[in-house]
Image: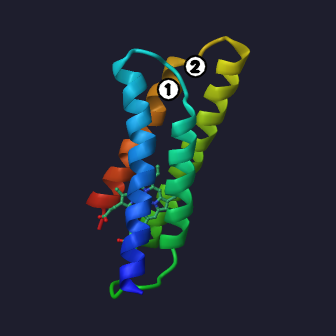
Amino acid sequence: METLRHVVVLVHLVGFALLFGAWAVEAVNRRLKITRLMNWGLLVAGVAGLALAAPWGVSYEMNYTKIAVKLVILLVIGALLGIGSARQRKGTGVPAAVFWLIGILTFVNAALAVLWR
Ligand code: HEM
């Protein structure tokens, strides 16, 4: 059970890497774009995160407040990706605040995961 949980954590991290990596590529190229890989990263991190939110394969007390905060942040990132994609399709471009918030909130969620014990 514990090994399976570690595998799901690994999948969760791959989702984070896809989302943050795809965002970083756009940021360094100075393109305020939403890409498909960002949506996939969010989906993978979200599904694996929900699986990890249940207390299986753990021998310690889980921090449910932290998990709830991470879930809310994930939903906000999802909304921002949706707003950004819609603007992009309309040809008006992704608002800078929407683009930067996606990266910042992804980073915040990873920081919460690692630093809030
Ligand atoms: C963009 C969204 C997210 C990012 C960037 C993210 C990032 C991370 C990272 C980097 C870790 C590893 C921390 C460590 O092992 O010390 C982690 C673990 C975890 N995450 Fe997330 N996460 C996200 C969303 C979520 C969501 C939505 C949930 C639950 C609803 C969640 C639940 C968990 C749990 C329970 C762990 C601990 C796994 C364990 O050690 O058993 N995460 N997350």
User: In x, y percent, where is residue 102?
Assistant: 48, 35
User: Pointer 1 and pointer 2: residues touching (CB < 8 Å)?
Assistant: yes
Residue 9: tell me if it is visible: yes
Q: Is residue 64 above or below residue 82?
A: below
Residue visible at 37% across and 84% down in the picture: 2
Label 2: state its secondary structure. loop
Name the residue at the right extreme.
Answer: 90
Q: Please state which of residues 102 and 66 is positioned toward the viewer in this rendering.
A: 102
**Up-down: is 44 above or below 106?**
below
Q: Identify which residue, 2 or 109, lies in the foreground.
A: 2
Q: Residue at x 39, y 67 (%)?
A: 9
Furthest-left residue in this view: 115
For image coordinates 51% across by 64% down, the residue present is 48
In this rendering, position of residue 10 left or right of residue 88: left
At label 2, the amino acid type is Val
In terms of sequence position, does the residue under pointer 1 or pointer 2 come before the other? 2
Residue 62 appears anywhere in the view: no
Residue at 66% in and 35% down:
82
Task: Identify whether 4 is placed above or below 34.
Answer: below
Name the residue furthest top. Answer: 92
The quadrant of the image that shows the N terminus is bottom left
Quadrant of the rendering where the C terminus is positioned: bottom left
Where's residue 87, x and y in %?
Answer: 67, 20
The x and y percentages for residue 107 are 36, 43
**Residue 99 shows which numbered tag?**
1
Looking at the picture, how far across and down is residue 30, in whole percent? Answer: 40, 15
Instruction: In this rendered view, identify the residue nearer to me: 70 or 42.
Output: 42
Ligand 1 location (quadrant): bottom left
Q: Quadrant of residue 106?
A: top left
Distance from label 1 to label 2 (Cα)?
7 Å
Q: Which residue is mark 2?
A: 94
